[in-house]
Amino acid sequence: MAELKYIPGFGNECASEDPRCPGALPEGQNNPQVCPYNLYAEQLSGSAFTCPRSTNKRSWLYRILPSVSHKPFESIDQGHVTNNWDEVDPDPNQLRWKPFEIPKASQKKVDFVSGLHTLCGAGDIKSNNGLAIHIFLCNTSMGNRCFYNSDGDFLIVPQKGKLHIYTEFGRMLVQPNEICVIQRGMRFSIDVFEETRGYILEVYGVHFELPDLGPIGANGLANPRDFLIPVAWYEDRQVPGGYTVINKYQGKLFAAKQDVSPFNVVAWHGNYTPYKYNLENFMVINSVAFDHADPSIFTVLTAKSVRPGVAIADFVIFPPRWGVADKTFRPPYYHRNCMSEFMGLIKGHYEAKQGGFLPGGGSLHSSMTPHGPDADCFEKASKAKLAPERIADGTMAFMFESSLSMAVTKWGLKTSNCLDENYYKCWEPLKSHFTPNSRKPAGPN
C-alpha cells in the first residue's frame, strides 16, 4: 500500500482535491449552478445551521453522484448492537473482562459491522444525549459494504490489527496505538489484514473536542497539529445493484442498495471531517514534587455535556512516563468516583494490576463503586524505594470516562463468556496495617 497523505490540525478549515482532477473545488462559492467536472455539490452538516461560528461544523463535498442515489433502506439483523440499557438488572460490582475472542476466519467471516458488540452505555439516542461502548471483533474486510452512524460519533481504538479506512473524505491507515474519529453521518468502509479487535466509544449529539488547558497554558497534552485528516481520494466504480450502505439509526441497523461506490468525492472543503491521532504524540503532564495530579491530566479528547466541566465522555490514556513524586504512593490511589470508568488495554500491562487485566479485555468501575490497586501492587508500592522510575514502558492503557451511569448489556454480562467472575478476589488479600500505638508509618519513607 502506498503511503497515505494527511492534512494536519484539529478542527481546521481544510480544502482538498484529488490530484487527478485539479481545480475540482469551485472558486468563490459553495454551490455553483454547474460544478467543475460536472460534479454534484452536497453539504454534510455536523451541527445546527445556527450554532455559533466557533462550534459550527459542516463540510461541502463535490461528488460524482450525490449520496441520495440509493434504494430504500430496510431493517436488517441487529447482531449484538443495542441501545437497550434495560436488558439485564443493574450490577454495581467491579467488572472485568478477559480478552474478547475474535472469530476465526476459517470458521466464519465477520467484518467490522457484523463484528460490532455493544458492551455498555447510557442515555437516549432519540434525544441525542448519551453514549455507548462497543467492542469490534472481525476477520475480513467490508468489501462492497459501507457504514454510517446517524446516532453519534465513533472514536475507534484498534487493539489488534491495523485498519485501512475508506471515507468520503479520503483514506486513513489506523494501527494499534493510534485512534481515529469518524463523525456522525460520515460513510466509511474498513479493510483488515488479519484477525482484528478494538474498542469504540460512541457519543450521541455532541462531538469530541480538545480539553481546555487552563493553568497548563497554551501547550501540552494532545497538540492540535498532531491530528491528521485524510486528503481527497475518489473511486468512480460501478457496482450494479451490489453496493450496500448500512445505517445505524435510533440504535437499529438498516441497509440500502446502490449501484456505485459511495467514495466518489473528488474534492471537499470544511471543518467537519474524520481524523486520526497517534497516542505516542501525547505530551504528558505529571507531578514532579509529591502526590498525584488528577487523571484528567491524561485527557486526549472530551465530549462535553451542558454542565460546565462535566463530560458526556472523556478519552483518557496512561502512556509511558517518568514517576518522580517524593513521599508518595505512586500507583493510582483507591477511589470512589461519581463518574463511570471503563478501562481497556492496547498493549503491555497496567501499572495497578499486573495480572488479570490483559490487552483486548476491559474493566468497568461504575459510579461510586470502589476500586484501586490490587493487593500485590499495594504491598510492593508501599515498600518501594522512591527513586525516579519509568512507568508503563511498552504499555498503553486507556479509559472511557462518563458522567452517566452506564448499564451493561446482556452480551457483556453473559453472552460474551468473557466476564471474569474472580475479579473481586484481587483485593481479598488486602490486610490491615493499622498501628494504633504508633503514628510513624513503617517502610522506606
Image (cartoon, helix red, strand yellow):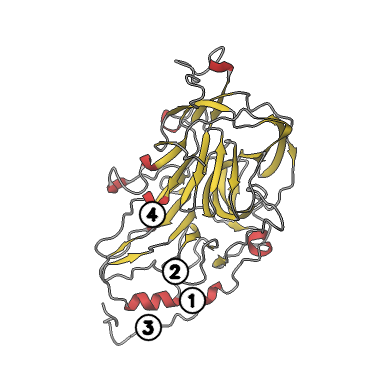
If the image is split into quadrants, where does the C terminus sit?
A: bottom left
Residue at image position (26%, 71%) is 387
Q: Nearer the viewer, mark 3 or mark 2?
A: 2
Residue 320 lies left or right of residue 4; in this view the side is left
Q: Disc 2 on helix, strand or loop?
A: loop
Disc marking residue 306:
none
Location of mark 3 (residue): 433
Residue 70 lies left or right of residue 36; in this view the side is right
- Assess disc 2: are there few (<14), some (14-19) or many (≥20) residues with their C-alpha within 10 Å of its C-alpha: some
Instruction: Work out whether residue 204 can be spotted.
Output: no
Residues at discs 2 and 1 in contact (Cβ within 8 Å): yes
Residue at image position (47%, 61%) is 347
Q: Which of marks 1 and 4 is in front?
A: 4
Residues at discs 3 and 4 in contact (Cβ within 8 Å): no
The amino acid pointed to by label 1 is Trp
Could you tell which of marks 1 and 3 lies nearer the N-terminus?
1
Location of mark 1 (residue): 427
The amino acid pointed to by label 3 is His
Location of mark 2 (residue): 372
Q: Disc 1 on helix, strand or loop?
A: helix
The amino acid pointed to by label 4 is Phe
Could you tell which of marks 1 and 4 lies nearer the N-terminus?
4
Could you tell which of marks 4 and 2 lies nearer the N-terminus?
4
Question: In the picture shown, does residue 5 fall above or below 114?
Answer: above
